Image: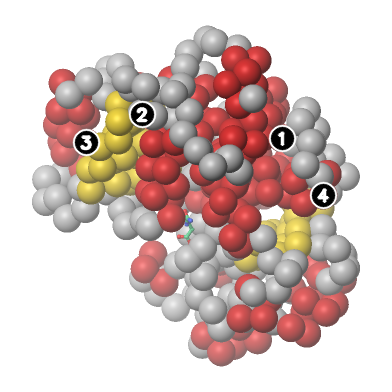
Amino acid sequence: MRHLLDTRTLAREDALRILDVAEDMRDTQSREIKKLPTLRGKTVVNLFFEDSTRTRISFEAAAKRLSADVINFSAKGSSVSKGESLQDTAQTLQAMGADAVVIRHGASGAPHTLATSGWISAGVLNAGDGTHEHPTQALLDAFTIRKRFFGDDSRGRDLSGLHVAIVGDILHSRVARSNVWLLTTLGARVTLVAPPTLVPQDVSAWPVTVVYDLDQAIADAPDAVMMLRIQLERMSAAYFPTEREYSRRWGLDAARMAALPTDSIVMHPGPMNRGLEISADAADSPRSTVLEQVANGVSVRMAALYLLLAGERSTNHAQEEAR
Ligand code: NCD
């Protein structure tokens, strides 16, 4: 793998390979000494043009646990036009000898531009681009689902037979898009649930079912319910009448939790708007995987960095190092 730009074009085998290596990485994370020497001498640059807490910290932890050097570059607030600033920044990073660039950018397609521009030779990992994709988030979500339903050693398994409902602000969500492609590639059935105003126009071409009523979706007994943050910062108009009305119709609360099958899980990529798309009892319930998702994110990003940077060395090598 040269780059990780999206899940739409990620083959099933490559997705499973990342998840399986992430299992090996996770095994190393319960040790007292969590650091592996694998990426010693490599430089990973975190290039963040948009705000982030958990994703940036997660990539930083992942790179450091593999012994890479990490440079954090927060480019927010730059006044140069996007194309120019990206090129200049990329060439600067190239001159500094970056081996991998983890990029988050407000413009959909920026990581792809970086990877194909010829400005740099580093591997590019998309950490969220506009409303387009957020592949490592979907991978950590798939990893979390696989672990909850198939147990500790689920290597080689896909998500066939599972049904995931993705609920809320689909329109602005790169997490939803990456999950739609990845989860369906892995054999899961996906239902999108949202008010009509928050469903993207091109959704008819997606391999999903769309419903507008959360109670109807819950009655269909999904194995996982993935709640999305209402992205007020990306909204220039009113997409729903009031927050109260939104939470009454599309929020996950105790009553809706009780209507779900007892073994179904509740997911959220964070940051959560508690009381809006998810109530505190739902977020803090034992069926919530919110913190598992964060923990698994480090293992999945270790796997992605390893597969990009340790080159053609085999998966067995990761397993050996994990022992
Ligand atoms: C998501 C993002 O930035 O796309 N958050 C994340 O990466 N943990 C989702 C969001 O911001 O709502």
Q: Residue at x 56, y 51 (%)?
A: 295
Q: Which amino acid, mark 2?
A: Ala
The first of marks 1 and 2 along the sequence is 2
Residue drawn at point x = 48 percent, y = 66 percent: 271
> Counting residues from the N terminus, which is met first, the one under dot 3 or under dot 4?
3
Disc sitting over residue 86 in the figure: 3
- Which is nearer the N-term, disc 3 or disc 1? 3
On whether ligand 1 comes within 8 Å of the CB at mark 4, the answer is: no
Choose mark 1 or mark 4, whichever is in front.
4
Does the CB distance between marks 3 and 4 fall below 8 Å?
no
Q: Is mark 1 within 8 Å of ligand 1?
A: no
Residues under labels 3 and 4: Cα distance? 41 Å
Q: CA distance from mark 2 to mark 4?
A: 33 Å
* Mark in the foreground, 3 or 4: 4
Q: Amino acid at mark 4?
A: Phe
Distance from Cα at disc 3 to Cα at disc 2: 23 Å
Q: What residue is rendered at 80% in x and 68% in y?
A: 217
Are the two marked residues, 3 and 2, in contact with CB atoms closer than 8 angstroms?
Answer: no
Instruction: Return the residue nearer the eye: 283 or 259.
Output: 283
State the SS at label 3.
helix
Q: Position of residue 247 (x, y in %)?
A: 61, 83
Residue underneath mark 4: 149
